[in-house]
Amino acid sequence: MTEYAGYMGKLLLIDLDEGSEREYPWTDKDRELYIGGKAMASKIMYDNFTGREEPFSPENMIIIATGPVTGTFAPSSNRFDISSLSPLTGITASSNCGGDFGFYLKKAGLDGLIIRGRSDRPIWIEIQEDKVSYHEAGELWGMRTGETQAALKKKLTELHGPKGRYGMVSIGPAGENLVRYAAVISGERAAGRAGIGAVFGSKNIKAIVASGNREVKIFNKEKAMEHHKKWTAALKAHPITGSQLPRLGTAGLVSTMQMRGQLATRNFSAGRFEDFEKVSGEALAEEENKGNTGCLSCPIRCSRTVEVDGKKVKGPELETLGLFGANLCNDNLNLVCRWNHELDELGLDSISCAGTIAWAMEANERGLWDNGLKFGQVDNISRVMEDIAFRRGIGAELAEGSKRLSEKYGGKDFAIQSKGMELSAYEPRRAVGQGLGYAVSNRGGCHLNGGYLVVLEGLGLSIDQQTPKAKADLCMFMQDFMEAISLCGHCLFTSYAVFPGFLISKPNSPMSRLVNSMIPHCGWAVRMLNKFPAMAFMNLPLIPYTYELKYAVGMKMNIGRFLRIGERSYNVERAVNAKFGVSAENDKLPKRLTKVLQDPKDPKSKVPLDRMKATYYKARGWGENGLPGDRKLKGLGIK
Ligand code: SF4
C-alpha cells in the first residue's frame, strides 16, 4: 500500500520454479528514494544478487517497472522499463520502452513485476488485476512478434470476449534462440537493448499480457491538468519537440550529425557519409513516410509510418537509419525501412545487430574472418538478420555480438562496443563528452545512459565538440537528470524542451553564441550543483518534471531532490555492476576512438578518455577504481 497517488502500491514477484506469486516489499520510503522504473529495479537487483548469477540462470530476474506518472495523462509519460542481467554484457541492463504495456500493468494494479526461475515449457503469462494465469505457448513458439501479438489477441478474445483491452510484450525467434542482443517488443515499440529478449527466452516466456480496470489516482487533479496543458503547449512550441521531431522524427538528426562529423560511417572509421542525403530524415519524410504515430498520451508523436510489402508499419529511427545506412555504407533507404520492420519482427536490437555486422564486414575486409560480408553490398542483409535470429550459418556467430567475435577472430580495436554493448550511431571523436558517456555508461555503449552529451555538442546546443573542459561534470549532471526523468515514466525526448528554444532555432545569434562559448568554462558551477544539489531548492517552469511529481503524485519535490534521486539511481546501478566485477578497467572505448584521429590533420579529433574519466570519478565522489565506496552508498541511503 502507499500514501502517494500515481502509484498502485504493489510489486508482484512471480517465481516460475515454485509456481508461486507474492507481493515484493516496497515502502513509501523506497518510493521517495528511488521513484520507480530502473532505479527501483536496480535496488531490487542490489538487494537480491550476490554477483554469482548468470544472465541465463534461473536466479536471474526480469524486472518490469513503471513510474508514478504513467497513467496520469501527463504528456509523454507512458514509458516502462525492463531490467535484468544482460546476456550481452553480463552486468545490469535496463531497456526503456514506449507503447502501452506500462499503462496496462498499472491498470492491472501493479507498479512492477519481478520474474525469477524458469518455466519447464514455453508459456505466456496473463496478469488480470489480482489474477495471474500461465498459458501454454507451444504453438506460439517460433512465431515472429507481429504474428505472436495477433495470435494472442485472438486467444484473449476467445477467453474474455471482444471488448478487452490489453498491453503486451513478446519476443520473437531471436529471443527464443538466445541471441545475445534479442529485443522485447510491445506493439510496435521495442525494449531493444542489452538482450533482455534472450532472458525471456531462457525462462521460456514467450509473452506477457496485462489488463485491468484499476484507477491511477491523481493527487491534485485540477493542478495536474492545468500543468499538463501548459507543458503540452510548451512541447508544441519548442523547435525540436514541436517541429523537428513531429516533422522528421529522430531521423532528422542524420543531417546535423553529418554536418558535425558525428555520423558513424564505415564501422566508425569516419564521421561523414557522402551519400547521407539518400538515407536522411528528409529523404524518409519525402519518399517513405505515410504518417506519424506515437506512444500513448504523447503530443510529440515522433514515430514514422512506412509501407513494407503493402503493409503500413513503423519506420526507422535515427539509430537504425544511421547504423544500417552510413555505418554499413548503404544508401538504400527503402531497404533500411524493410530491415527495420524485419528486426522488430525477429525481435532483434537494431543497434547491436548493425554494429556486429559492421564489425564483421571490416573483419572480412581485413582477412580476419571469411564471412562474405562487405561494406556497401547489402542485398544479403535480410537473410543475414534471419540467420542471426535463428542462429544459422554465420548468423550463429553474429548472434554473439562484436566483443565476443573480436576475442575469437582478432580486431578488438575496431569492435565498436563498451562493456560488450555496441555503440549507438553518434561518432564520439567529434563529440568527446559523448565519448566519455559511452565509456562510463553503466549498461555499456549507450548514448542515453551515458548522459547524451552529444545533445550539447551539436544536436541541440553547439558547445565545443572537441574540448574535454567541463565535459566530466556535464556528463554526471546529464546522467543524473535524465535518470530522474526516466524513473518517473517520462520520455527522455521531452527533455529537449528544457533548452530555451531560441538557443536551438537561432544558433548564430549573439546570445546563443555567448551561451555556447560560456558552458565549457562553467564546469566548476556544474560541479557545485552536482555536489550540493540541495542548493537548488526551488522549482522552475522550464523543468516540468518536479511539478508533475508534486501535483500528480503528491510528493515533496524540488530540482535538488530530483537530481539527488537521479544520482542515487546511477550509483545503485553501479553498485550492482560492482558485484559483478565492474571497475574503472571496464570503462573504456575501442582504440579506434581513443588513439586514431578521425581527421589526421586535427590532433583533437579523438576521445581524450583517460583525462575526462579521472575528473568524472572525482565529480561522482568515486574512488580511482571507478566505484562508489561505502560512505558514498550510505550517504545516498543505498546501503
Ligand atoms: S516522443 Fe516519441 S518515443 Fe517519446 S513518448 Fe512520444 S512518441 Fe513515444
Image (tube, helix red, strand yellow):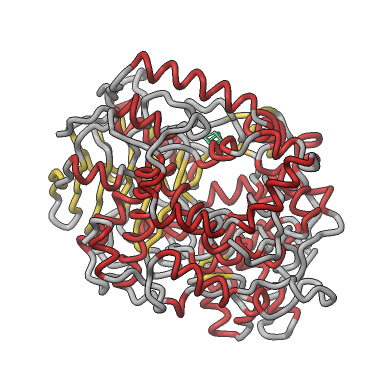
- Residue 384 picture location, percent across and down: 63, 63
359, above or below 489, in the image: below
Query: Quarter of the picture for ligand 1?
Result: top right
Q: What residue is rendered at 40% in x and 64% in y?
A: 86
Q: How many marks?
A: 0
- Residue 394 picture location, percent across and down: 60, 72
365, above or below 382, in the image: below
- Residue 228 picture location, percent across and down: 46, 21
| Near-viewer residue (211 or 270) | 270
What is the quadrant of the C terminus in the image?
A: bottom left
| Near-viewer residue (396 or 217) | 217
Q: What residue is rendered at 54% in x and 39% in y?
A: 495
- Residue 134 picture location, percent across and down: 23, 43
42, above or below 108, in the image: below
402, above or below 461, in the image: below
Query: Does 426 sit left or right of 452 as displayed?
Result: right
What is the quadrant of the N terminus in the image?
A: top left
| Near-viewer residue (380 or 321) | 321
Residue 31 visible in image: yes
Q: What residue is rendered at 63% in x and 67% in y?
A: 468
Residue 128 visible in image: no
Give the residue furthest to the top: 222
